[in-house]
Image (spheres, rainbow, N blue to C red):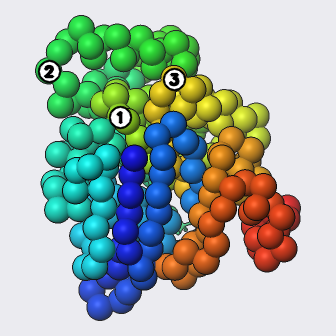
Amino acid sequence: MLKINGITTRYGTVEILRDVSLNIDEGEIVALLGANGAGKTTILNTIIGLIRPIYGNIYLENKRIDKMKTSEIIKVGISMVMENRGIFPDLNILENLRIGSLYEKDEKSTNKTLKEVYDLFPILKERENQLAGTLSGGEQGMLAIGRGMMSKPKIMLLDEPSLGLAPMLVDEVFEAIKRINNEGTTILLVEQNAVKALKIASRGYVLQKGQIITEGTVKELKGNEVIKKAYLTI
Ligand SMILES: Nc1ncnc2c1ncn2[C@@H]1O[C@H](COP(=O)(O)OP(=O)(O)OP(=O)(O)O)[C@@H](O)[C@H]1O
Ligand SMILES: [Mg+2]
């Protein structure tokens, strides 16, 4: 469904990603693992069109997207939940969610998606009118995921959704991701919490200093001694 073919990305003259290829099939949850600074966020930023690759290309289904604008990439079916969550603190929950469906003209369809978000995260419904800036970290995390759902993406890019959350909330967020996936959305999940990520993913890639060093099924990754030592020990 999403094919990233040999992308190389630079910030200025510094090469951040080198010849990175990823392949995500419809319906999958794929984990992207790697240490701080490995380039995980840069991969997501490149997919969503915030950074342009200097080599390589990216396809969603059969459409080439690496030259498209971010707004167009969202319209063809990709949404991104950013690492810093990117919510608007001075807008309330409902207003933040509606920003996620800016490109949806059909009000009925928007309301249906909104209901799905509220079913998944009832707390957002209860707090609908609360300013997002006053939400707890966990609630903000849910709001960010909810907003990512509002554009009805075919594939959702999640950048460290568990960051800064208490263990109980981490489980809740991972449960929500699984449910979103069960309802038909493909997921690319960036996580430092490799143990948890590999619990819900079917496959994974490991990025090191801008290059994919290993890929495989969860079983293969868990059986890989290097991966075990570097990412799966607590
Ligand atoms: N705008 C930028 N200008 C210059 N260098 C950048 C910029 N953004 C990121 N980098 C560098 O690119 C490298 C990869 O960063 P990136 O944010 O993709 O890593 P990451 O794997 O997401 O790390 P983390 O787990 O800490 O979020 C880092 O060395 C970072 O300093
Ligand atoms: Mg990052």
Q: Residue furthest bottom?
A: 13
First in residue order: circle 2 vs circle 3:
2
Task: Identify the image quadrant of the C terminus.
Answer: bottom right
Separation of residues labelled 1 and 3 (CA atoms) = 12 Å
Indicate the amino acid at tag 2.
Lys
Residue at the (26%, 13%) spot, across then down: 109
Tags 2 and 3 touching, CB below 8 Å: no
87 to the left or right of 138: left
Indicate the amino acid at tag 1.
Pro
Separation of residues labelled 2 and 3 (CA atoms) = 23 Å
Residue 14 placement (x, y as % from top left):
36, 89
Asked if residue 230 can be seen in this view, the reply is: yes
Quadrant in which residue 230 is drawn: bottom right
Residue 17 placement (x, y as % from top left):
42, 78
Q: Secondary structure at mark 1?
A: loop
Residue matched to label 3: 183
Residue 100 placement (x, y as % from top left):
30, 32
**118 up-or-down from 25: above or below:** above
Alpha-carbon neighbours of circle 2 within 10 Å: few (<14), some, or many (≥20)?
few
First in residue order: circle 1 vs circle 3:
1
Alpha-carbon neighbours of circle 1 within 10 Å: few (<14), some, or many (≥20)?
many
Is 92 or 184 nearer to us in this picture?
Answer: 184
Tags 2 and 1 touching, CB below 8 Å: no
Q: Secondary structure at mark 2?
A: loop
Residue 60 placement (x, y as % from top left):
31, 49
Is 95 or 133 nearer to us in this picture?
Answer: 95
Residue matched to label 2: 105
Residue matched to label 1: 153
Asked if residue 35 can be seen in this view, the reply is: no
Residue at the (20%, 30%) spot, across then down: 102
